[in-house]
Structures are given as structure tokens and as C-alpha cells.
Image (tube, grey):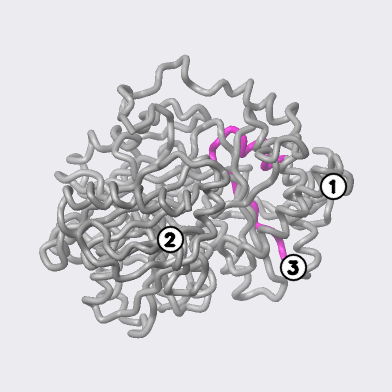
Amino acid sequence: MAIHPLAGQLAPHDSLVNIPELMTAYYLKKPRIETHPEEQVSFGTSGHRGSALLVSFNEDHILAITQAIAEYRQAQKITGPLYLGKDTHALSEAAFKTALSVLTANNVRVRIQLNGGFTPTPVISHAVLTHNKIQSDLSDGVVITPSHNPPEDGGIKYNSIKGGPADKDITDRIANRANELLGKKLEGVKRFTPEEVEKSGLIEPFDYINHYVDDLENIIDMTSIAKAKVRIGVDPMGGSGIHYWEPIAKKYGLDITLVNPEVDPTFRFVPVDKDGRIRMDCSSPYSMSGLLKLKDDFDIAVGNDPDYDRHGIVCAGSGLMNPNAYLGVAIEYLSQHREAWPNDVQFGKTLVSSGMIDRVVKGLDRTLCEVPVGFKWYVESMFEGSMAFGGEESAGASFLRKDGTVWTTDKDGFILALLAAEILAVTGKDPQTLYLEQVEKYGQPFYKRIDVVATPAQKNILGALDTKDVTQTELAGETIESVLTHAPGNGAAIGGLKVSTKNGWFAARPSGTENVYKIYLESFVSEEHLAELEKEAKILVDSVLKA
């Protein structure tokens, strides 16, 4: 895809989302699920997402989804408070109020941030887990966020009693019930008025900020960061974690500078991404171009997306790290500096993350667990403490506490950002320097992800492939060593396929929201070999889709 001429620059004023129009659409547009299936509730890897303007995230959706969640909680006898969070997207505030009206009408106690503030995804996971560790009335959580998606989007996801994204059985149950309610014109949905919500006595203000910040010393070596006087620059990118950094700096004596304190639902201060759209993607050099201009002012600079489940790491002199590269560095550092972690604990990666991680984990003589795309696949193992680290190529990860017990079972952008500062403080080398040392030892990876147009029928074929559907024996001049349609780490279907040779691989899987399939490619040979991989991968997938 060609790079948009405005990529890395601020968006023209006339291209910003019209917030009044968006909010009007949220309340007035109604999903037509019988004739427009794209307007149904659909839970992808991170909940239900859409835009009110496209009638895919509207008040009716949230009414139905929240009622379905309330019914699920009742069926499972989950009687503790529900921890409810929201990010800074415009639709998040409206959906938050809608969700509150349904939850309280269903007699659910709800814990929200003091003074109605924002609450990041990892903070909700942390709160659920710390509650359930000491209380008998189990809790769960809901986060209202479309993550890094554009300003006109909305999203909602359900976190189970284990703190992380609910598994497919649960989300299918919620989605099916929600669509049933939509089909019945919301008959069966209980809802309070704002006055009834206020009088219900079910809203419990909760100090999420201090609850989370006070616990950080149990997962990050804050003392070493403070002693080393690491200069940390933070671009909150207008996200939900903006009010956490000052308390972190104050409590632990850290040198933290917020380079942009703005919150605005148009996100007008975020440079546009490679396609010319505003997207708060902290792994994109275009969206992060504002922070990159300041990289030499700090030892480590970090950015996070609106719900703070992703991280972008900027090192002085070298710039924004590739997310895959940082995952490998984080794994190597943590395996060597967390003495209480058992030697047999696993390190997790998704099938589409870099093969560098495989090589690093093997070099450490540790155990790798490779799973399909989606952080939900890590929840059980991280909850149990049998997986020390789980990461995704899209710049999301979490890891265990210093003592080897669970911290969050959802991605946590705060701790990955602070870990970069810890790495520099303890080793004297920034993460990019350590990555180059890994390249010297394990080889240089060349990685790429592309989107290919596909019809819904083709996406269905790709999602249901069997290994026998691939008959080729060579790929880009090398013998094919494996063809996977199920993840080796847990045996779960990957919804596509992954083909590997000695020095390269590609994976193809259909998009859950667009009429495209995604191809992930990596070569440990050269850019030319990567190009050959891309050419032959497309041919191979096309042959399977036409078979």
C-alpha cells in the first residue's frame, strides 16, 4: 500500500471526525441485523468494535451486550462487583453511561474510577485479579474501548473472573444472546434512567489509580530506575493512562516528562498513520512521529494507545523499536533478572510474532509456547503462573510479578514501558542496543505484514483450511518444514495457516472486520528473500482459495 502524503503530519481540520454527528448516530441509528449482518454484534479477538456512523457500534448494541453480560454473570453466580473502565474515545463515554444503566437495572454492583475518570485496560485486569485473590465474591470486568482504532470507533470487551479477555465460548454466548435481544427489538433488556442509576446505591467509586500505582514496585524494579536517574519521556497519545504518570513519578521518584497533556476525542494532536487516517497506534512511526522528534531529549521515550494495552518504545539516537524486536529483548532480560521465576516457566508468543523470539528462547534453554492471535490464549497460563510472559507482534504484552505470581492477564502498556527504563537502568544498555546484540548472535530478521483483498467466501475457506490443502513442498527456494493450521503451543485452530522453512515463514489469516486476509512474513536471509516469500505466499494462498 502506498504511503499517504500526509503520513506523520497532523490531520487537516476538515478531516477530523464530527463529534456531534457521531454522538447523534450513536443514539438515533438502529442496527438492521436481519438485512445487514455486518450490523450484528460480533466479538473478535478483542471484543465487539465498530462505529456509530456505520451502525456497528450504537446504543442498541451496548444495551444488548450489557444485558447479555449481566445474564451471564447471574448464570455463573458471579456476585462480586463488576470493574468497569473506559478510554478516551468519544463513543466510550456514551457507551459507559449506557452500560451503567443496564448493569444497575440488573442489580450489579459496579466499580468506576473516582470522579468518573478514565480507566486503562490493564488496570481493570489488575483490579479484578487483586479482588479475587482475597475476596470470596468473585468479580469480573468490562472495558469500553476500541483500542488504537480511529476516533470515530467504539469498542466493548468482557474480562472474565480470571482478569483477561473472555474465551470464545463465553463471548459467543454473549454475542448470540445480544443478537437475540436485538432481533426482539430489545425486549428483555432491563434499563434504569440516570436518576435511578444514581439512587440505586450500586455505583461504587474506586481509586483505580493508587490501587494500581502502589503495586507497581512488585513487578518493576522502580528503585533501580530512580537511582539511575533515567530520563523518561511519555506521550499518552490522549489515552486513558494520562493521569497515572504523575502519581508514578511522585511515588517512586522517577524523572518522567509528559510531552503532551491533551485529551480530545478528535485526537487532532496525533499525526496521521500511513493510510492518512488518525490511528493512535504506538507501534507506528507515523502516529508516533511527534514523540520521535523528541527522542534525543530522553534516555527512553514511550507511547501508549488509548486503553493502554499497547506500548511503543523509543530509544535515544535510534528511534522507535520494532515491536517484535522489543519482545525478544524483554524476554531475555526478564529470564535473567527475575530470580524467583521457575526455570520451567513458559514464554508465550503468537504464531505471527517474529521467529527471533523462538531463537532467543531456545538460546536461553527456556520453553516457548506458540498460540493463535489474541491475548485470550494466554489468560489461563498466566493466571496459573505457568507462563511468565505473553506477547503479541502488535505491541502488546504482559508478564508475571517478581515473585512469579500473576499481575494482569491482559496486555499492559505501563509495565512494558517501565521495563524499558528498568533494562537501561540495570544493564546500562537501552533495549535497541540489546536487540542488535541478539541480531549478532541469532541473525537479522526481515519482517512484513500485508493485507490482500478477499471475498467473505474466500475468508471462510482460509479460516477452515486443513494441512492437506497445501501440496507444495518448497517455498522461496527452501524445503517446507511445517504447515500448521493449529498452534503448537495449545492445539487451538489458528483460523488460517502458517508455512515454515529453515530461514523463513509466512502466515495467512482472514481479517475479522474487513474483506481482506492478512499475510505475515519473515525471512532470516535478506529483503530479496522476503520479497520472494511474499510472491510465493500469495500464489500458494490463491491456489488454495481457488481449489
Task: Name the secondary structure under disc 3.
Answer: loop
Q: Please tell me which of labels 1 and 3 falls first in the chain.
A: 3
Q: Position of residue 492 (x, y in %)?
A: 52, 69
Q: Please tell me which of labels 2 and 1 falls first in the chain.
A: 1
Vertical arrangement, residue 407 with respect to residue 297, above or below: below
- The residue under label 3 is 78
- Three-letter residue code for mark 2: Leu
Query: Could you say which quadrant of the image residue 106 lies in?
Result: bottom right
Give the foreground label among 1 and 3: 1
Vertical arrangement, residue 487 with respect to residue 176, above or below: below
Residue at screen point 37% across, 73% down: 347
Task: Give the residues drawn in magenta, as a range.
Answer: 79-97
Vertical arrangement, residue 364 with respect to residue 521, above or below: below
Q: Would residue 534 appear left or right of 212 to someone viewing this image? A: left
Work out whether residue 254 or residue 317 is closer to the camera in this orientation and state it. 317
**Callout 2 crowding tier (Cα within 10 Å): few <14, some 14–19, many ≥20:** many
| Residue 261 in magenta stretch | no
Residue 248 seen anywhere in this rendered image of the structure: no
Q: Would residue 377 appear left or right of 520 to someone viewing this image? A: right
- Three-letter residue code for mark 1: Val
Give the foreground label among 3 and 2: 2
- The residue under label 2 is 497
Query: Could you say which quadrant of the image residue 81 lies in?
Result: bottom right
Give the foreground label among 2 and 1: 2
| Residue 91 in magenta stretch | yes
Task: Name the secondary structure under disc 1.
Answer: loop
Q: Residue furthest right?
A: 187
The mark found on residue 506 in the picture is none
Q: Position of residue 283 (x, y in %)?
A: 34, 45
